[in-house]
Each structure stands twice: as C-alpha cells, then as structure tokens.
Amino acid sequence: MNQNRQDIDENLLLQYLLGNADDESGMKIAAWLNADSRNSKQLDQLEALWLETGRLVPPPVPVDLQKAWKNISTRIDKHEKMHASSKSTTIGRRYIYYAISAAATVILVLGIYIVMRLVTGRVKEVEIATNGLVIKKTLTDGTKILINRNSKLTCPENFPVGNRLVKLTGEAFFEVARNPSAPFVVDAGIAKVKVLGTVFNVSAYPGKDVLVTVSEGRVLFFTASANNNDTLSVILVAGMSGIYKPGSARPEILKNPLPDNLFWANRTLEFTRTPLSEVFKLIEQYYGVKVSVGNQDILDCQLSATFVNDPADRIMDIIAESFGLNVSLTNGIYYFKGNGCTKGNN
Amino acid sequence: MLSRTDFEILFRSHYSSLCSYANGFLKDVDASEEVVQEVMFKLWAGRETLVIESSMKGYLFRAVRNSCMNTFKHLKIRDEYKVYHETRGMEDQRSLEDEMIFTELEQKVRLAIDNLPLERRKVFIMSRYDGLTYNQIAHKLDISVKTVENQMGKALKSLREELADYLPWVVLFLFDILRK
C-alpha cells in the first residue's frame, strides 16, 4: 500500500474498529483522526452504523425485489385471466374457498401427494420416450432437458400455477428455469428431486439405484414414505451426488461420485483425487485412445480436475503439466514419461 | 377492496422484511422467498372476502410465520424448531406483534440496506450477518477479493452517509458499552 491519503477508506476504518488493523495502519489512522475533527466524527458514525446494523433481528436477507414483484405480478395476471374466463355462479363459492384457505393457515408445502394428485388428475400430459437417441427438449417454462437413451419423461402440456412436476424413468439432465414460486419436482418413482432453478442430472432406471448429480445450485433429494405422509431428504449442492437405493430408508450423499456421471450430457469428467490409473481407463473408454506409461509410479498420482468438453490432447497436456511429466503421441498412443508419485504423497 | 396499486405498495414495502422474518425460521433464503410469495399471492387471490382483524402488516407476518411452521412440519425438522423455540422462550410467546414492530431507527437502517444495489447488499449482508471473510464472500459470489473490498467500502460509505443524521445520537451511550 502507498501512503497517500486515499488509503484511509471505510474498509480500513472498519478493520481498525474490529481490532484487525496492524500497527502501521493504526498509526496512520491516529494521524488521520488528529488531522481533522470531521475525521473522528466519520469514525464515530461508522462505529455507530456497525453496531446499529448488528441489532437487526432477524437479519436482513439479500432479496431481489424487482424480480420478486415481476414474478408475482405474472402469477396474478395468470390467475386473473383464469378467473375472468370462469366467471359464473360459482364465483362466490370460489372466493369463499380462497378466503378459508388464506384465513386458516396458509399452507405452502401441500404435501407432495396432494400436489401430484392434482397434477395428474386434470392436466393434459406429454410423453417423450427415447430408445437409441438422446433427445433435447425445452419445456414451456424455459427448462431445458436432455433425455438419455432408453428413458421416458412425462410432463403436463402446460404447467399449472405454483408447481412444475415431471415424471422420469431412465436418465435426464435438467437445466431448470428459475422460478421461486413454482418449485420444479422430478418424480423418479421411488425418489423425488425438488429444485427452484438449477442444473442437475437424474438417473433412475427401473430396478436400479436413483442417482442425482448437481452441477449448479442446490436440490432437495427426497423420498416420500407412504405410511406416515412424511419425507426423508438430503440437500445436495453443486458438485455433490446423492444416491437412493431401492428399499433403503432415505437418500444419502454419495461420498465418491463417479467422475463420468455427466459425460453423456455435457462431456464433463470431474476427478477428485482420482488415481491416474482410473483416469486413463475412463479417457481410453470415452475418447477411443490408448495411454501407456514409462513408470508405474505415474499411475499413483492423484488428479483433481474438471474437464468440460475438452479434447483428449488438452486433457493429456494438463495431466502432464500437473505432475511434471512428459507426454508424447505416437500411433494413437499417449506415452507418459517422468518420475510419477509415491503412494499417499502428492 | 384491495386495488392492484395498493397491493403493489404493500408488496414492495413488506417483501424484504417478511423474507428476513421467514429466514429467521427457515435459514434458507430461497425457501423464505417462496413462502412470502405464496402468502402474498393468497392474499391477492382472497382479497374479496378476506377479513383481517388486526392490521394488514400483522396479518402478513402471522401468515408467513404459519407457513414456516407448516414447512417445518412437512420437513420433519420440528425438533430443531422446538429447540429454537425454547431458546427464544418467553420472548417469542409474548406477542407476535412486538416482534414485528421495528423501531423507527431499525426501519431506517433496514430500508437503507434494502436500497443498496443487489451485489453490494449481498456482500454487506454476508460480511455483517453471516460472518464470512472477504475471501469466503469472493468465493461464494464468484468475484475477486478486490471487488468485495470495494463493494463493502461503498456499502459502508453510503449507509453511513444516508444514516448520518440518526447515528451520532446512538454512539454516545453505545461507546460505553463497547469499552467495557
């Protein structure tokens, strides 16, 4: 830092008030305070501000008011339109219904069963089934879905107000358009995933474990137990995977997610301290190349890296660089030379 | 009956503090926004026959609180809530209205924070209320530490300037508390 007077800004003053400033800054501030009585008033105000803001209980949250208002006015417009078209003698009864539901307790989460019954009861549905091909589909709410081979996705032609429910058998990659007032729920039979707006993958082939991998944002991965109307859930955030084994009590966080979970959807390989022996196996499988090493110790090196849509050449270069190795390509075989790593020491 | 304009004013003036209130229970900003929007929507949908006995504001806070309770019930973390409830103890039982009536100064401080641009507000809230370091904030918001410092500095400056007329009063006696 230089010694011009601009050094003394609100940030430094705050650190000083919190006792985090070093001696040098402290002396500088002392000089600054002495130079002008307005300066000490500024510091007093800052201190008061810090104390006053700390008294706010519950603390403020960073909400986007513009967005929230836009959201709710769209919802109201839709509601009004629906209402106008059905204005008849039932109108009185409708309002009484609303009044009762608002005046009693306002229930947000209706219990997934009720939601599902409502949805499946009266809405025209669209079904997309794939066999040999991966299909890309954009839903009416802007959500993008990539449906893997041999899978089936069912959803209403238009989502009803307040919820978005789709059914999945097989595997699909979701890029959900964010809408806090209409949670997006993927019903994968024995387990379900609820989100507000995120990117994630669900794999739910019949008779197999249900696997959820999150690329962005956060999802609630849950199962609904029929006997006590309760849900058992885990929250997964970006980079995490969850698993639900048929017959088990609840979904769990997967400790070692597979590096290639998302490869089918967006050519992502995500390694977390994965030994190169496994890394090479996957690259050979997906890129149709061969890898060999001049020194077995190389295979013990543990790689932590994410590759998205990278060509094999680039991946190999990055691996070589990470561990100080040399790589050359001859006749379709990548050959790694160098010292490698000793076990447990990276 | 509530007009669209009245409703918008109501929404805009209470949305942020209702979300803050809900977040006190739910500890999840997204879920809190969801709850508040649902309550506001139900209010609009039922406006023709809704009878509100006390104040509109009281009704909104009560409805948000009830919604949060229902969310708890559903997620079966009632036990956690019970702990929360017990720790807050009598104070919580006393009167819901008491909780919602902020002092004039508190309202001014909240409003000043609400008026910060979104990113600046996020930085300030994370630093002041979530106790995160600048490094952690930079990481969470995917911006540089320099930007965090910058935004925090600007937030402090504009809050201080905006609230300048109210602040010096407090400092006199708070100073003593702080020095103890």
Image (cartoon, rainbow, N blue to C red):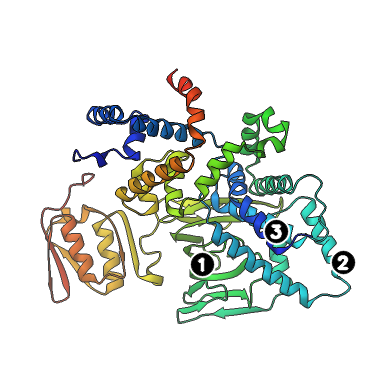
Determine whether label 2 and label 3 are within 8 Å by CB: no
Q: Residue at x 54, y 61 (%)?
A: A67
- Chain letter belonging to callout 2: A
Q: Quadrant of the N terminus of chain B?
A: bottom right
| Element type where label 2 sits in the image | helix
Q: Is residue A173 left or right of residue B82?
A: left
Q: Are marks 2 and 3 on the same chain?
A: no
Q: Residue at x 45, y 17 (%)?
A: B180
Relative to A133, does residue A96 appear above or below in the rendering?
A: above
Residue A329, numbered circle: none
Three-letter code for the amino acid on which mark 2 is drawn: Gly
Q: Which residue is disc 1 drawn over?
A: A176
- Chain letter belonging to callout 1: A
Q: Quadrant of residue A312?
A: bottom left
| Element type where label 1 sits in the image | loop
Q: Nearer the viewer, mark 2 or mark 3?
A: 3
Mark 2 neighbour class, 10 Å CA radius: few under 14, some 14 to 19, many 20 or more: few
Q: Nearer the viewer, mark 3 or mark 1?
A: 3
Q: Which residue is disc 3 drawn over?
A: B6
Q: Quadrant of residue A87?
A: bottom right
Q: Which residue is disc 2 drawn over?
A: A92
The disc, 2 or 1, on the residue closer to the chain's N-terminal end is: 2
Spatial CA distance of label 2 from label 3 is: 23 Å
Q: Is residue B122 left or right of residue A299?
A: right
Relative to A64, does residue B101 appear above or below in the rendering?
A: above
Relative to B1, does residue B69 appear above or below in the rendering?
A: above
Determine whether label 3 and label 1 are within 8 Å by CB: no
Three-letter code for the amino acid on which mark 1 is drawn: Val
Image position, residue A189 (x, y; %): 61, 64
